Amino acid sequence: MIKLTRRGTIGLGLGAFFALASASTALAADTIKIGYPANLTGIQASLDGPMLNGAKLAASEINASGGVLGQQIELVIYDSKSDSTTISTVASQLIDSDKVVGIIGFADSDSVLAIGPQVQKAQIPFITPGATSPKLPGQLGNEIFLAAFGDNVQAAVGAEFALNKLNGKTAYLLTDIGTEYTTLLSDYFVAAYEHGGGKILERDTYKIGDKTFTAQIAKLKALSPQPDFVYASSNAEEIGLILKQMRQAGINLPVVGGDGYDTPLLIQVGGDAAKDTYFTTHAYIGEGAAPKVQAFIDAYTKSVGNAPENAFAALGYDSVKLMADAIKRAGAPDPAKIRDALAATSGLDGVTGTITYRPGISVPDKSVSVIGVKDGKLVLASEAAPTFVAEP
Amino acid sequence: MSREARITLLVLVALVAGAAVAFGAPHVLSDYFVRIILLIALNAILVLALSLSNGFTGVFSLGHVGFIGAGAYISGILSIPVQQKMALLPHLPAFLHAFSLPFLPATLVAGLLTALLAVVVGYPLMRLSGYFVSVATMGFLIIVNVVLINASDFTRGARTFTGVPLETTLPWVMGWLAITLFVLARLVYSPFGRAMKAVRDDTIAASAVGIGVLRTRLIAFVTGAFFSGVGGSLYAHYLGSFSPNTFYFALTMSLITMLVLGGMGSLTGAVVGVVCVSLLSEVLRTVERGFTIGDFAVPALFGASQIVLGFIFILVMIFRPKGIMGDREFTFGLTQGSATVNQTEERKR
């Protein structure tokens, strides 16, 4: 009889784990593999989760209609845990072990900066559905593509919306200097707003994670004359608190911001105080949305069990369609050909707008939706492409 | 063969084996496995640096990650190429703009500056004992984090610090690991090492026999800080981009877990802890993606790896409260020799 020592048991267990791990990858041969690292746990989970659901929906739709180049596509998904060390390990796993032909991932610029050097070195095309820093391709290289508009575009639309629709000639600017996204967004807003003839009366800052904004609000209240509106470049958690504390202090000015507002938290935390708030984002996915968006909402609700949480779900969906389209036009699952096909993408119709890359520019020109809050609900306030856009 | 010759031989064999892994692995293994080995070696340096004060001297520091962060940022600022510095950090003082250092000097400077920082911080803090020193060093970690976020001219604030050249390769890390192990082994298993353990086990008795408690603790703390700073630099040049929150409570917890799991009073225990935790979390990370055996499919359960890992830690602490190695070392039969030698020497006295 074979006697198992404790050490032997541990060895067997580990061996079984590794065998299982390799078995799961070996089974799925003859598919086109697309890497999908996602921050499913950690601080980015509320954005990356819906995004992954959207991506899976797109992949199953593509596979149901026959796949790409006669092959099924397979999303190779790893949880990168909102941690840059894990992101770099996952990247090498995808590139080296899983041999993916392209990678899609992340809703924030910081995670893209973490994975960028490796995908660039391995010459694997990479699409980020949700990161919006237009500087990313310049910082990292020619394999990096954005599926969303750049922050310079949404800031410009926000500025023009404030100038023309809200008649806001003067502004108070509040910036979260804790993240790359909010800092850049503010800079682009100032460029576009001042170019359009607006005047910033006063500016102040805070950091992601702050809970009280009394000092900033007091500064705003002391302004004479009062500005026409407030531009708050904020992330999802803080904007609700800012609105609440501002309305309590008796300030009823309109508040304008970017796609960082676009989570259910805005209305959950802000409540009544969220009235007269406007933000620029990728698509309007509420009541009375455009037919193609409504079709997406229905399909998402059917496969996930709830309506899309935010526009990032739609961006995840569009990114997989974008990659599949490039693979189809490349004619072969070859990373170099896919990259070239991706760069030549023109007029691809998606839920979040039409994607076209101008030569040498990996940030698409897309229209921006401006969403306002009315009676505790999100309504489409405007949809526009800006007339002036600041350089990235 | 005499004991000294055997030790020399063992060290040589270990060095040759390490060098073989360092230079051979990238040719034989895939990039993924090379990265896992690299991360294990890198974390081993960090955990070893931590073990010096937390394990051997009884100063349970929660602030070492502050030194790692400081080392990462210092070396990062020094080694970003001059052209990129202007674009990424436009408000740096002029003399920092003028030059950029190669990897090794930047790492050494980072280590030395963090050691200097440790002298300043440690001088008042090393007078504290027990829980108080843990809380005080945690205060230091928080201060470092706030400074990193607010000194935005140097660090880009809370935004991602990027552009650090990716220079950390396996031979570099293995080399630094060998140096760390060598220095620490010499320090811990020397008369001074005995003083450290005496301070840990009974502070009053130690000072009664003439051991300078503050001096002993400070030397352990500063040496640990030097290697933390070096490790921070290696980390910075491995990741290429990082933010102040990369070096905060999450990293502190994971390093302490590795140390406690491996055994607090043992250098090889620290390494064993790192290897076990790293391999286990890698395996679990792959398994949580779901798998199929025949017709039986286990769906993906993201986040399960953290739960299982936590559960295993609890089990280890119940069944081996002193960690896997406790205070023993892997010595391939050499400690027994040394123990008997010591005993005979003591008997002679």
Image: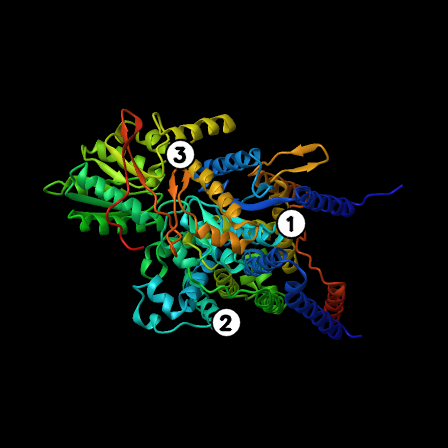
Q: Are marks 3 and 1 on the same chain?
A: no
- Which quadrant of the structure image shows residue A310? top left
**Cα–Cα span, label 3 and label 1:** 46 Å
Tell me which amino acid carries mark 1. Gly
- Asked whether A201 or B51 is in front, the reply is A201
Q: Which residue is mark 3?
A: A310
Q: Secondary structure at mark 1?
A: loop
Whether residue B203 is visible to the viewer of this picture, yes or no, is yes
**Which quadrant of the rendered structure holds the N terminus of chain B?**
bottom right
Residue A85, image x and y in percent? 52, 53
Residue farthest along the right direction in this orientation: A1
**Dot 2 alpha-carbon crowd within 10 angstroms: few under 14, some 14 to 19, many 20 or more:** some
Q: Position of residue A312 (x, y in %)?
A: 42, 38
Q: Estimate the x, y position of residue A2 in percent, counting from the top left.
A: 87, 43
Q: Is residue A215 visible?
A: no
Number of residue marks: 3
Q: Is residue A142 above or below residue A373?
A: below
Q: Which residue is mark 1?
A: B323
Q: Chain under label 2? A: B
Task: Name the one closer to the observer, B40 or A257.
Answer: A257
Q: Chain of mark 3?
A: A
Q: Are marks 2 and 1 in contact (CB under 8 Å)?
A: no
Look at label 3 and name its amino acid: Asn
Q: Which residue is mark 2?
A: B104
**Is B209 left or right of A6, judged from the image as shown?**
left
Amino acid at the residue labelled 2: Leu
